Structure formats: structure tokens, C-alpha cells
Image: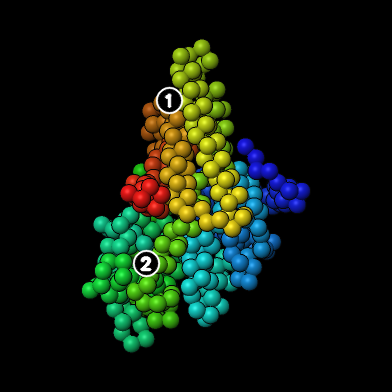
């Protein structure tokens, strides 16, 4: 399915495709770039895009954005996703950056925005806590005012790529007597501050992507408070809206389906009855992906006319993550016994005959993608949002 483009937008799409083909670093073309690349390697494409002026498509031009139309932003998202490029760090560019230029003061904009664009500062997100995941209003990390500082104590968890981070943006409770959503503030914390400890969490696929972050009597300058004290819930919701809108993942799912088809063809004989079942399953998920893409195109068309799509972000998050989970599940089933092998198991201990190149990566993708329906607000929570905002329940 294609968005009908003007000649100007079609020329822009061609420019994007050519730029990616000519400039995306070869060393970043690995099976699992999210976990297989070093911090320095992960930033190579970021720096190329920054030099080009294309690092922050959503940002207003006055803050360093490229000044693209909504259609051009959509084209960029589709083309980079289809090409499999590693996106710029979302916590920096998509999440905290827009919060700072929307709600931050001039000093914060001047200090943080240029370093986000250049990649000098790597940000992570301090939202979830033990016992406070999708229900973020129950965060217990405390920030107590002490003169020109806040003293912060608490525990953040599932903190993605915190092992690389220079800064963390945190939801903290500044008024424990207020109603849950009313007593939260949005703080920017230097990860080098005394009292900040990062401990790795190794996930079921064997990778180190997430972490625990402990905050023990961390002194944070009051100047690092974004907006007003106890108004952080407003900024948190704004940030999560940006995060969820990007979760449709049409391009990535399209690439994964093409890979699935190749694996099925290589692993399952055409005369095997299982082959027909896989064909039906693939057809179903392709139809669902086409329906999601049509919805996304409709929303893009509405936004280009200045119409607010409303709760579409929650819809994209639910359907996009469910589709990708189904694709990785089918792919894992298609490789049979190879799916029992993971890269952390030494070859000498592997009871299976060494398999094709995709053996390890398929298993890891399947396991890693189980998280998609949980992070960014669980899909159950998103259904509650839709029920209230759309159905009035």
C-alpha cells in the first residue's frame, strides 16, 4: 500500500532512499543492532544524520528540526524502517527533547537541546519502578527540596541502555500528601552524580539491554526541574504519546515478514502439510499489517489537514506490537529445533548440529519481542485508554 505522493514528496522519498543507501554505516548492518553494537558504533548513524540536519524529524525548525511536513516525516519513518536502519536514540530525540523544548525554560533548552541533537548526551528513561510499571501514578522515588537542590532516593527498573547513559529523566514524587497524579515532578539527573548506581539485568535472550538504577541521596539542582513542581504527570503523558505513536512499526514488520517467507521456504518442504498452515498464518498477519498501514495512512492524511488523531497512538501501540510478536513467533516455529539454541550457549555444549546463520538471531528476536506488549504502557492499559476516550466506557 502506498501513500499518494506529490511530485515534491516523491522526489524527497527518492532522496531519502539514496541517502540511506550511500551513507548508512556498513558496521551497523548486524542482525541485532540494538544489543550487538557498542555505544560508539550505535552513534555513527546519529552523527551522520546530525551533520545532514535530519536527526530530529519531529522537532520544530527553531530548535534544530529539518522543517519537514507531516507527509515527509511519514516518508522518513517508512523508508528508514524498511531499510532496517538503527533509529536515533528514542529516549533522547523522541522523548526528552520534545518535553524540554515544549515545557522547559530557556536555560534548559540552551543547555540540553544542542547536545541531544549532536549525540553528546545519551539519555535514558526513569519511569518504571518495582511495583509501578503501567500504573506510573504510583511511583515512590522521592525528591525532597533542600535549598537549591532536591535529595532523590528511589529505585528505577527496566531502564533501557542505562549502562551507556549520561543523563536520566525521572518521574519523582515531590508531594507525598497529594493525589497520586498531582504530586509528581519531572527531573533531569546527571548519571555521574554521587549516589547513582546502575546494575545490569540480563534478559531471557541473553542480552544486556535493561538495568536497575538505584538513587541514594542524589543531589539534583533545582534548575533541573522541568516545568512546575508537582506537574510532572502532564509532561509524562505528553512524552508517552510521542513514544506510542512510533510503535506501529510497519516497515520493520514488513521486513520481518519477508524474512519469515524465506525461512519457511528454506526449512519446510512444499509438500509438507505444515507448509500450507504456515501460508495461511502468514496471509493472516499480512492482512492485519495492511489494515494497520491503511489506518496509519488515514491518520497521516488527517494530521496533514490539521486534525488531531486522538487516541490513535494507543491503537498503533496495540496492533503494531501484537503483529510483530506474531511474526517472530511464526519465524521461531519455522526453524524447528534450531530455535532451542542461543548465542550464550557455547558451540561445544550445543547438542544440535550447527545450523544456518539465522539460527541464533531468530530465537533471540522471538524472546526479546515478548516485551513489546508490556513496555510503553501495557496493551491492557492501552485498551483501557481506548475504552474511555473512544467508547466512553
What is the x, y in percent for residue 183?
A: 30, 72
Q: Would you say 320 lies left or right of 351 here?
A: right
Mark 1 to mark 2 CA distance (whole Å): 46 Å
In the image, residue 192 sits, relative to residue 316, either above or below, namely below
Q: Nearer the viewer, mark 1 or mark 2?
A: 2
Residue placed farthest to the front in the image? 392
> How is the model colour-coded?
rainbow
The label number, if any, that marks residue 275 in the structure image: none
Q: Splitting the image into 4 quarters, where does residue 239 fall?
A: bottom left
**Residue 205 in view, yes or no:** no
Q: As rendered, which of 206 and 251 lies closer to the eye?
A: 251
Residue placed farthest to the left in the image? 177
Residue placed farthest to the top in the image? 271
Give me the residue at 61% from left, 49% from top.
301
Label 2 environment density (alpha carbons within 10 Å; few <14, some 14–19, many ≥20): many
**Residue 340 in view, yes or no:** yes
What is the x, y in percent for residue 104?
A: 48, 75
- Of labels 1 and 2, earlier in sequence is 2
The quadrant the N terminus occupies is top right
Give me the residue at 61% from left, 55% from top.
305
- The count of marks equals 2
Label 1 environment density (alpha carbons within 10 Å; few <14, some 14–19, many ≥20): few
What is the x, y in percent for residue 124?
A: 44, 62
Q: As rendered, which of 229 and 148 lies closer to the eye?
A: 229
The label number, if any, that marks residue 233 in the structure image: 2
Q: Which residue bears the numbered disc 1?
A: 336
In the image, residue 374 sits, relative to residue 189, either above or below, namely above
Amino acid at each position: 500500500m502506498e501513500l499518494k505522493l506529490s511530485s515534491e514528496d516523491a522526489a524527497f522519498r527518492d532522496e531519502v532512499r539514496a541517502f540511506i543507501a550511500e551513507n548508512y554505516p556498513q558496521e551497523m548492518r548486524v542482525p541485532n543492532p540494538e544489543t550487538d553494537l557498542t555505544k560508539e558504533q550505535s552513534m555513527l548513524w546519529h552523527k551522520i544524520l546530525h551533520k545532514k540536519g535530519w536527526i530530529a524529524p519531529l522537532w520544530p525548525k527553531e530548535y534544530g528540526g529539518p522543517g519537514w511536513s507531516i507527509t515527509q516525516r511519514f516518508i522518513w519513518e517508512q523508508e528508514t524502517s524498511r531499510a532496517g536502519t538503527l533509529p536515533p536514540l528514542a529516549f533522547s530525540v523522541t522523548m526528552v527533547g520534545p518535553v524540554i523544548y515544549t515545557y522547559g525554560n530557556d536555560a534548559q533548552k540552551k543547555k540540553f537541546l544542542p547536545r541531544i541533537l549532536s549525540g553528546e548526551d545519551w539519555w535514558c528513561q526513569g519511569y518504571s519502578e518495582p511495583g509501578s510499571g503501567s500504573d506510573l501514578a504510583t511511583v515512590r522515588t522521592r525528591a525532597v527540596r533542600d535549598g537549591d537542590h532536591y535529595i532523590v532516593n528511589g529505585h528505577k527498573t527496566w531502564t533501557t541502555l542505562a549502562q551507556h547513559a549520561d543523563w536520566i529523566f525521572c518521574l519523582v514524587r515531590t508531594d507525598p500528601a497529594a493525589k497520586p497524579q498531582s504530586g509528581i515532578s519531572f527531573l533531569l539527573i546527571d548519571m555521574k552524580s554521587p549516589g547513582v548506581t546502575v546494575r545490569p539485568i540480563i534478559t531471557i535472550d541473553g542480552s544486556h539491554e535493561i538495568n536497575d538504577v538505584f538513587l541514594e541521596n542524589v543531589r539534583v539542582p533545582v534548575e533541573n526541574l522541568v516545568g512546575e513542581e508537582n506537574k510532572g504527570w502532564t509532561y509524562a503523558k505528553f512524552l508517552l504519546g510521542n513514544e506510542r505513536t512510533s510503535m506501529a512499526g510497519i516497515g520493520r514488520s514488513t521486513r520481518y515478514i519477508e524474512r519469515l517467507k524465506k525461512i519457511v521456504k528454506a526449512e519446510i518442504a512444499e509438500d509438507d502439510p505444515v507448509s500450507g498452515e504456515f501460508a495461511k498464518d502468514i496471509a493472516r498477519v499480512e492482512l492485519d499489517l495492511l489494515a494497520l498501514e491503511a489506518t496509519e495512512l488515514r491518520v497521516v492524511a488527517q494530521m496533514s489537514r490539521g486534525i488531531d488523531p486522538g487516541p490513535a497512538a494507543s491503537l498503533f501501540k496495540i496492533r503494531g506490537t501484537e503483529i510483530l510478536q506474531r511474526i517472530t513467533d511464526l519465524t521461531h516455529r519455522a526453524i524447528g529445533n534450531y530455535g532451542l539454541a542461543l548465542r550464550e550457549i557455547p558451540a561445544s555444549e550445543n547438542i544440535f548440529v550447527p545450523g544456518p546463520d539465522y539460527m541464533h538471531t531468530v530465537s533471540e528476536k522471538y524472546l526479546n519481542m515478548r516485551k513489546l506488549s508490556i513496555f510503553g504502557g501495557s496493551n491492557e492499559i492501552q485498551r483501557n485508554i481506548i475504552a474511555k476516550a473512544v467508547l466512553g466506557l
